[in-house]
Image (spheres, grey):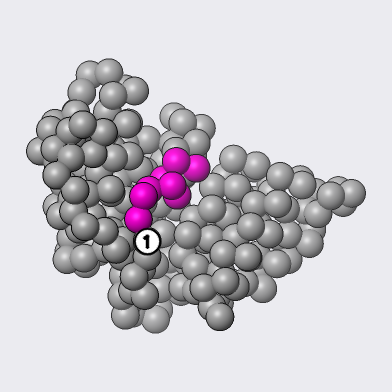
Amino acid sequence: MLVVALAIATTASHVAAQSHSDGALAVQTPQSVAGHSLEETEKLVSDENRTVRLRAAKSLAAFGQEAGPVLRRALDHDDAAVRYTVAVGLGRVGGEALIEAQSDLHAMMSQDSSEAMRMASAFALCRIPQADAKHMAESLDVLVKKIQTPSRAVACSAAELLGMLGRDATSAAKSIEEVAKNNRPGSSGDYHIGGAAQKALRQIQAEAR
């Protein structure tokens, strides 16, 4: 389950939208995505076919903030991979639904049985505009600790989420740089992790300028 959930991170970063300065997706709400309306897509998230529901979960964020309430409702889905995807999506679209989900996300970040879900919740919490400094630091620290793990799947997923945070992850840049250094090609580390860390650094530095 964890491997499937982590694999979705790659797709989550390719949602067709630009970012506002507050981290929310800047999109004109489309009437349909992949041939389905928002209402139809929400129904498909509960489909018995796992491939169908995961595709639907990944499509939700493309509807922008209008999908916020749908994404929030899906946070308690039985499928950990769906929960992961909608948590990342909720962080991407932002808005009132994200703010209203703070308490649920904090609980998931600390208590969810899925390691991937704990990371996704941390990412979403980091996207809340003007978040409390203490809570922001706690959420960011979850991702920093995960990028420092020797597990390639976990570390690379954490690196992607940190890169998606852009300048909101600036305070973690030194830690990410250390991971990149310790996992550079020719070292005793994992060059896949090193490459993911380098990519995250480039994304963070590009937005920080």
Q: Is residue 4 visible?
A: yes
Furthest residue toward top:
49
Q: Residue at x 35, y 55 (%)?
A: 17
Q: Nearer the viewer, residue 199 or 141?
A: 199
The chief SS type of the magenta part is: loop
Q: Residue at x 70, y 67 (%)?
A: 177
What amino acid does circle 1 point to? Gln
Whole-percent x and y of residue 88?
Answer: 36, 51
Quarter holding the C terminus is bottom right
Residue 15 left/right relative to 207: left
User: What crowding class fits label 1: few (fewer than 14 Cα within 10 Å), some (14-19), or many (20 or more)?
Assistant: few
Whole-percent x and y of residue 208?
Answer: 54, 78
Q: Nearer the viewer, residue 112 or 208?
A: 208
Segment tinted magenta in the rendering: 10-17
Residue 40 left/right relative to 191: left
Would you name the residue on which mark 1 appears? 18
Whole-percent x and y of residue 203?
Answer: 57, 64
Question: Is residue 15 shown in magenta?
Answer: yes
Q: Quadrant of residue 105?
A: bottom left
User: Where 111 falls versus 143 (above or below)?
Assistant: above
User: Where 204 falls versus 157 (above or below)?
Assistant: below
Question: Is residue 16 shown in magenta?
Answer: yes
Q: Quadrant of residue 102?
A: bottom left
Residue 48 left/right relative to 157: left
Q: Residue at x 32, y 51 (%)?
A: 89
User: Where 154 falls versus 92 (above or below)?
Assistant: above
Q: Nearer the viewer, residue 19 or 195?
A: 19
Furthest residue toward left:
39
Q: Quadrant of residue 197?
A: bottom right
